Amino acid sequence: MIALTREPIDTDALLAAVHDPLCGAVVLFLGTVRELTGTLRTVHLEYDAYGPMAEKKLHEVAALAAQRWPVRRVDIIHRLGKLAIGEVAVAVAVSTPHRAEAFAAAEFIMDQVKQLVPIWKQENAPDGSATWAHGADS
């Protein structure tokens, strides 16, 4: 599954979806909302995206990973909307025959998502100020 969602990400379902009997490795990466970015405190994040283009780019990123590594299954899910501290904002699950490939593919996918996919986040501070950032900037 490759998707944008406003609902919490079901990590158990995500892991089940990428299970493959030919694979000995499954990597699950979860990007969560953190309270501190350097010295700046965040009370919540809001994610927005240009949906059709973002989903198209997510599919392209998955295909690029499958060209570089023997990825059998991959899921990428990114949340949109308001997220509290600790909530999962993005999940990447990858299955490959061996662990090194799964780790490399998952890291590559996350790097590409931040660089290529039109998803923006608004960091909201305790004083009510807000700053928008795009993936590679955040």
Image (spheres, rainbow, N blue to C red):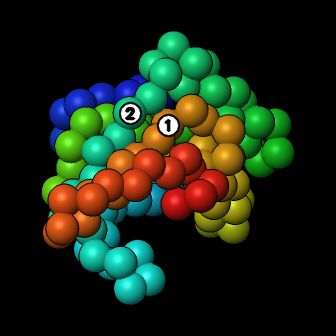
Identity of the residue drawn at 60% across and 44% down? 113
Numbered tag placed on residue 48 in the rendering: 2
Query: Element type at marker 1?
Result: strand
The percent coordinates of residue 128 (x first, y second) are 19, 59
Q: Taking the image as drawn, is residue 105 in sight?
A: no
The percent coordinates of residue 132 (x first, y second) are 44, 49
Identity of the residue drawn at 54% across and 25% down? 54
In the image, taking residue 124 as reference, residue 55 lies left or right, namely: right
Q: Amino acid at mark 2?
A: Asp
Numbered tag placed on residue 119 in the rendering: 1
- Nearer to me, 133 or 21: 133
In the rendered view, tell whether residue 43 sits above or below residue 96: below
Identity of the residue drawn at 77% across and 48% down? 69
Name, please, the residue furthest toward the bottom. 39
Q: Earlier in the sequence, mark 2 or mark 1?
A: 2
In the image, taking residue 134 as reference, residue 128 lies left or right, namely: left
Q: How many marks?
A: 2
Q: Amino acid at mark 1?
A: Ile
Numbered tag placed on residue 69 in the rendering: none
Query: Element type at marker 2?
Result: strand
In the rendered view, tell whether residue 103 sits above or below residue 122: below
In the image, taking residue 101 as reference, residue 35 lies left or right, namely: left
**Dot 2 crowding, Cα within 10 Å, few <14, some 14–19, many 20+:** some
**Dot 1 crowding, Cα within 10 Å, few <14, some 14–19, many 20+:** many
Name, please, the residue furthest toward the top. 52
Q: Quadrant of the N terminus?
A: top left
Identity of the residue drawn at 41% across and 76% down? 37
Q: Quadrant of residue 70?
A: top right
Gap between marks 2 and 1 measured at Cα? 6 Å
- Nearer to me, 91 or 20: 91
